Structures are given as C-alpha cells and as structure tokens.
Amino acid sequence: MLFETERLWMTEWQAADWLAFRPIAQDPDVMRYIDSGKLWSDERVRHFVQSQIQKVKESGFCHWKLIERASGALIGFCGLQHYEGEIEIGWWLAKACWGRGLGTEAARVALLDALQRVRLPRVIAMAQPENRASIHIMEKLGMRFERNAARNGINVVVYGIDNTEAVASG
C-alpha cells in the first residue's frame, strides 16, 4: 500500500528499514517526548519495524514508513496502531524535518485513510502535555481535547475525533 502527498510517500516497511530508522529512534531530541525519553536499542528498532510489517498483515494498517520525495530518505513514520481498545494515530519525524508541516501533511492522509478506507468510527491521539508540536498537529486535524491520562506511567493528553465530526469538518 502506498499513499502519496505533495512531499511524502507513505508505504509499508521492509525488514532492512530498521537501519535507516535507527538514527531517528536514537536521537535524544526526537525521543524527548516518547515514553520516558529513553533512546531505543538496535534490537528495539528492529522489533518495531518487524511489528509494523506484521500489523499490516493483521489489520491492514500500521505506522507507515515516511519517505521524503525530494531526497528519497526515510524521515519517520505516521499511521495507526491499536491501543487499549481504541485506535491511535501517531507520528515521528527526524529532527531535520521539524517545522515544515510534514507531520501534519502525513497525519491528514493517515486520518483520512483511517476514517474512509478502514472505516473506523473514532480515532484518538496522545501526547505529553509539553509536546506542543504534536498537540498542534492534533488540533489542525480537527481533534478535540478529551482527557488527561497516563500511558506507561507518563502523563499524556488524549485528543479524539469521530467519523461524523471528521465528515462534518471537511
């Protein structure tokens, strides 16, 4: 499966992609608001990529690999995952790609896919309250603040959107 935006390709992972993804998962700035902020080991990066390959087979969606069209570089991921009985949209971008609207560009496509092709009735997103960039993306997607929560012992805010809201907003 492949999604295309003006500046991105969103596609399935291949096993060898862990090598290109490793610098992102081992960048302290990228990982600052991911769980406890701990950098991922090579083994965890490999496991993540393998799990995305498996998730596509099982559910038809995953955190799609993001490729910047201009450079052909793997710059992060964006997509869906199951989380405690709900479906969560999430994204990571390499630090060099921050502040260019690429996260929003990818998230709009992933959310549209979730609501149209996958036909999900509802999608949530979570971020640590200090992660204003991710919260801003959630707001640009039309998601609304729902609650404060804890994820793996870390305080997060939960935003959500249901299919009828997304259709009504556009």
Image (cartoon, rainbow, N blue to C red):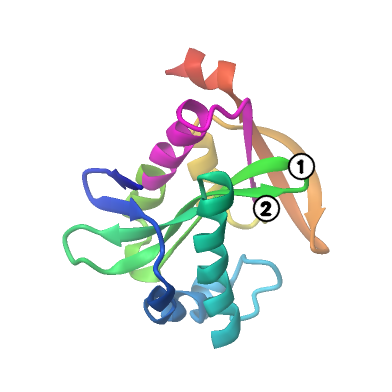
Q: List x then y, in percent, for residue 5.
A: 26, 43
Residue 41 visible at all: no
Q: List x then y, in percent, for residue 39.
A: 59, 81
Q: Secondary structure at mark 2?
A: loop
In the depicted structure, whether residue 135 falls above or below residue 160: below
Mark 1 / mark 2, whichever is N-terminal: 1
Which stretch did the figure color magenta?
Answer: 106-127
Amino acid type for the residue under numbered disc 1: Gly
Q: Is residue 126 magenta?
A: yes
The residues bearing labels 1 and 2 have C-alpha atoms spaced at a distance of: 22 Å
Residue 48 visible at all: yes
Would residue 125 appear left or right of 157 to someone viewing this image?
Answer: left
Judged from this view, the residue extending furthest toward the bottom is 42
Give the residue at x 67% y 53%.
Answer: 129
Judged from this view, the residue extending furthest toward the front is 57
Residue identified by numbered label 1: 85
Judged from this view, the residue extending furthest toward the left is 70
Amino acid type for the residue under numbered disc 2: Pro
Q: Which mark is residue 129?
A: 2
In the depicted structure, whether residue 12 falls above or below residue 83: below
Image quarter of the C terminus: top left
Choose top left, top right, bottom left or bottom right for residue 48.
Answer: bottom right
Observer-nearest of 154 and 86: 86
Give the residue at x 54% y 27%.
Answer: 119
